[in-house]
Image: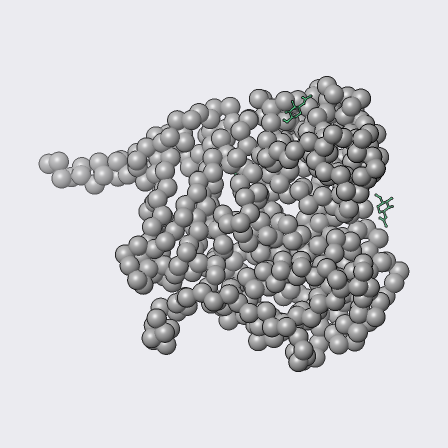
Amino acid sequence: MLGKYNSLIILLLLILLKNNFGHEIKLYGPGLQPKNIVMPARYFFVNFTSIDENSYSRDLALNFAVEINGKSFKSNHCRVWVNTLDRKDGTFIVRYKLYETCTELSIGIYYKNKHIHDSPYRFEGPIQPDQCDCPKKDMKQWLKHYECPASYAQIENDLRPFKNLIMSNQIKKIIKNFHKPESTSFCHYIIKNNEIYRDCYGKHIGFNMFADNILLSLTRKVAMPDMELIINLGDWPLVHKGSEPLPIFSWCGNNETLDIVMPTYDITESALENMGRVTLDTLSVQGNVERKWADRENRAFWRGRDSRAERLKLIDIARAHPDLINASLTNFFFFREKEAQYGPKLPHISFFKFFDYKYQINVDGTVAAYRLPYLLSGGSLVMKQESPYYEHFYGKLQPFEHFIPIRRDLSDLPDKIIWAREHDEEAHQIARNARNFATNNLLPQHIICYHAVLFSEWSKRIKGEVNVEKDMTHVPQVKFECVCDLTSSVDREEL
Ligand SMILES: *[C@@H]1O[C@H](CO)[C@@H](O)[C@H](O)[C@H]1NC(C)=O
Ligand SMILES: *[C@@H]1O[C@H](CO)[C@@H](O)[C@H](O)[C@H]1NC(C)=O
Ligand SMILES: *[C@@H]1O[C@H](CO)[C@@H](O)[C@H](O)[C@H]1NC(C)=O
């Protein structure tokens, strides 16, 4: 008799289990596609959608757990490091780093010791760590699998002046016009048969390691088209409007220049060294701030070095309005003679502590302040100085939606802070929008995609065969033992 109801009972049980104690839970993110999306640190989101900053309690974190393990060729255990970040608003960010090729991988996600949704998620290998030099052959397909957008307005805009370029001529002109060893440094890069070569000009070429890193990272993942390009290693963009548009890739743009903008070396390193050498990144900021909005001080906070006159001015304004602003310089270099007036310099404090304050100030340094991605991620309201300088993503940022604009001379800063105090709900919403913007545009996947789409589009703008000149430096991949293809007997024999 009971048998008739068995399936119904099982179904009900399943619904209850899936219901996860009344929580609706959303799972998403590139880390749930570990085969297609190879990253230094993979990540995904677990969103308890009914919980927010105010209803969050530590119980949620205590009842949440993740377990990731797998098998490798050599053992029944694949080396994986897992790190969970608690945004304290009902969303967890789970990051994990593979240290070897996994032949199997299982991701278990639990709430109150029960699996969430279809957890455990199981994958059959090979699932590669980022160090593996296992490029996919078809770039178009790879871009799709990696979930990269087909295009970016900024890239289309930057590349508009360029088509059918014969690069040997362009390179000659760039060297002639811009090779000033004391003040500019740039490298000529060639990608040929997915190998990287470079030739650098200038005195300060140490930053070529950042360009090397992203190019090496991409060519490990996908076979890049042959191409050549010039990457500017300095902060300042070089190609002024009105002069001949020569193609130079730079980390910072200016509304009076034509340089092709790439994500800054700073955010690129933080994407490539996530869960590695770099501890400040657009994910870690989301999990390491301690105070929710309501508990943050309703003052503006700023720390930084003296790399622009307005930064000194900010100190003057802060001294006149200590009730509104806590700002100090941490280093004197550009205005050493003013240290007595604008000092004493204060020691650095953890960037995560910035978010003990509701309002954050973004003032240019020598060029755009490369901290903006992290400021946007921290859940405070960003007050951004108007500026001709921009990074690759500024075109998508909207004033009063993602940040509050401040006049270039900072004169309206106190008024804007007073406005924010008097419009706390609007200010909070802009802060939330900013963090959502960062989550949708500034995570490692987005940074890798931007480079991939940029270089892929760029390769279509140049014509003729790419030839490596014989005195160029070959930039090799770091040796790392990998199995690219489980079915290939050649790879297995190499083990
Ligand atoms: C979590 O889900 C809610 C509701 O769908 C959404 O508003 C919020 O932006 C999500 N959080 C994140 C970090 O994606
Ligand atoms: C400014 O901020 C620092 C770091 O949070 C803090 O130690 C100091 O007391 C603050 N100063 C004032 C005047 O609030
Ligand atoms: C560039 O920015 C400056 C400062 O914000 C502004 O005065 C100038 O008009 C802008 N120029 C262009 C071409 O948009």
Q: Is residue 132 left or right of residue 191?
A: left
Q: How many marks?
A: 0
Coordinates of residue 215 in the picture (x, y in percent): 60, 63
Q: Above or below — where is 259 with respect to 361? A: below
- Residue 357, located in which quarter of the rendered image? top right
Q: Nearer the viewer, residue 341 or 169?
A: 341
Q: Nearer the viewer, residue 350 or 39?
A: 350
Q: Above or below — where is 128 with respect to 381? A: below
Q: Residue at x 74, y 45 (%)?
A: 368
Q: Residue at x 80, y 43 (%)?
A: 334
Q: Is residue 184 left or right of residue 482?
A: right
Q: Check the picture and name the quadrant holding the C terminus.
A: bottom left
Q: Check the picture and name the quadrant holding the N terminus.
A: top left
Coordinates of residue 71 in the picture (x, y in percent): 31, 57
Question: According to the image, what is the colour scheme of the structure?
Answer: one colour
User: Given the current orientation, which residue lies at the most extreme right position?
Assistant: 242
User: Given the current orientation, which residue lies at the most extreme left position?
Assistant: 1
Q: Residue at x 71, y 46 (%)?
A: 394
| Res. 370 in view | yes
Q: Residue at x 55, y 69 (%)?
A: 476
Q: Nearer the viewer, residue 5 or 183?
A: 183
Q: Is residue 481 left or right of residue 298?
A: left
| Res. 260 in view | no
Coordinates of residue 103 in the picture (x, y in percent): 34, 61
Coordinates of residue 353 in the picture (x, y in percent): 59, 31
